[in-house]
Image (tube, rainbow, N blue to C red):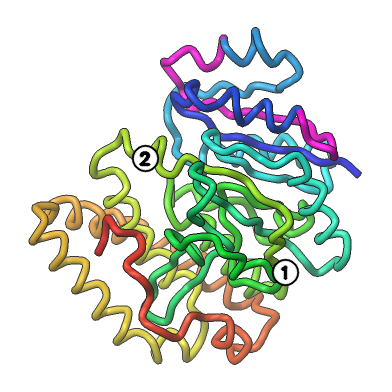
Amino acid sequence: MHLVVVIPNWNGKEHLGDALDSLRSQTLKPTVLVVDNGSVDGSQDFIKKTYPEVKLIERDKNYGFTGGVNPGIEEAIKTDADYVALLNNDAVADKDWLKHLVAKAENDSKIGIVACKTIRTDKKHLDSTGECFSIWGVPFPRGRNQVDSNQYDKAEEVFGGSGGASLYRVSLLKEIGLFDQRFFAYFEDVDISFRARLAGWKIWYEPEAFVYHHVSATASKLGNFARYHSVKNFFLVYIKNMPGWLYWKYLPLFSIQSLRWLASSTLKGHLWTFIKAYLAFLAYLPSTLKDRWKIQKNRKVSIKEIDELLYHQRPPKIPALLS
C-alpha cells in the first residue's frame, strides 16, 4: 500500500516544521510532498536542509490551495499511490492520524474520502469534523468553534471532508478529477466532496484520527482575499453541483443568501470585493456549465439521496467573514 501526504505551502515556515515533524512521527509511514507556492520566507531552503526526505515541488508564484495540492496529487498518481492525504502547513497530526484514516478506507472500497477531527491548537475548540452543505448553498465545517466535549466522537458518514486534513482514495481522484483550479481557495474541498457524492462514493468521518490546526494562519495575512474567493466559490459550488430539481427547489434560498451577503458586504465596506468576486464567477460560468453537464450526466445516486445528505436548517454564521 502506497500512501502519500501532500502539504501546500505559501510563506508558512513558522509552522511548517511542526507539521513535518508530526509526519515523521506517524505510525504508518508516508511519502511526503510539499508543494511550495513561491514562498519568500525561506521555506524552500528550510525544507531542503532540515527535511531532506521530503520531496519539494517549487512553483513560481502563489497558485492558491488548489494549485498547491494538485501538483502533489499528480505526482502521487504517477507513482501509483493508493491514497493521498492532505495536511495544511499549519496543522500538527497525531501520530496515529494516518493509521486510522487508512484503516477506515480499507474497511470499505466505496469510501472515497475519510475526514478526521480537526481541533484548534488550544486543544479545546473544534475546527472541523467534516464538511456540511446547506440548502441555502452555504458550506460550513461541522462543529466549528464548539468546545470539544466528545459530541462528535462517533464514526459516521458526512457530506464532505476538509481539504486541510483528509484522506482521498486515488481511484476516486482518477474518476472525478482533482481540485478545481477555478476555486483557488475556499470551498474547493466541498466541491470535490459534492462531485464524489454525485459519483456514488461514500465519505466518512473518523474521530480517532485527529490533528491540531492554527486556524487561518495563512489566510489572515491576505485581507479581502478570503471574502473574494468565498463569494466567487459560493456561486460556483451551487451552479456546478446541485442536481436536478434540487437546484430549482433551493434556488430561492440560495438567492436570498446571495442578497444577504451582498448587503453584508455593502454595510461592512466590501461592496467592491463582492462585485469583483461575482464578475469572476460570471467569467467562469460558461466553463462551469460545461462541467455541470458532465457531472450531472454521470451522476450515480438518486436526487433523494443527495437531498438527505444536505443540511436542512439555517447554517451557522460560518464563515464569519461573510456573516
On-image quarter of the C terminus: bottom left
Along the viewing direction, whichever of 133 and 28 lies nearer the viewer: 28
**Bounds of the magenta segment:** 25-45
What percent of the width, then of the height, locates residue 305?
Answer: 63, 87
Residue appearing at x 40%, y 64% in the figure:
236
Along the viewing direction, whichever of 57 and 226 lies nearer the viewer: 226
* 207 w.r.t. 304: above or below: above
On-image quarter of the N terminus: top right
Q: Quadrant of residue 222?
A: top left
What percent of the width, then of the height, locates residue 152?
Answer: 61, 68
Residue appearing at x 47%, y 26% in the figure:
12
2 or 1: tag closer to the N-terminus: 1
* 244 w.r.t. 66: above or below: below
* 114 w.r.t. 18: above or below: below
Query: Left or right of 257: which side holds 43?
Result: right
Q: What residue is disc 2 on?
A: 219
Amino acid at dot 1: Ala
Within the magenta stretch, is there residue 30? yes
- Mark identifier at residue 155: 1
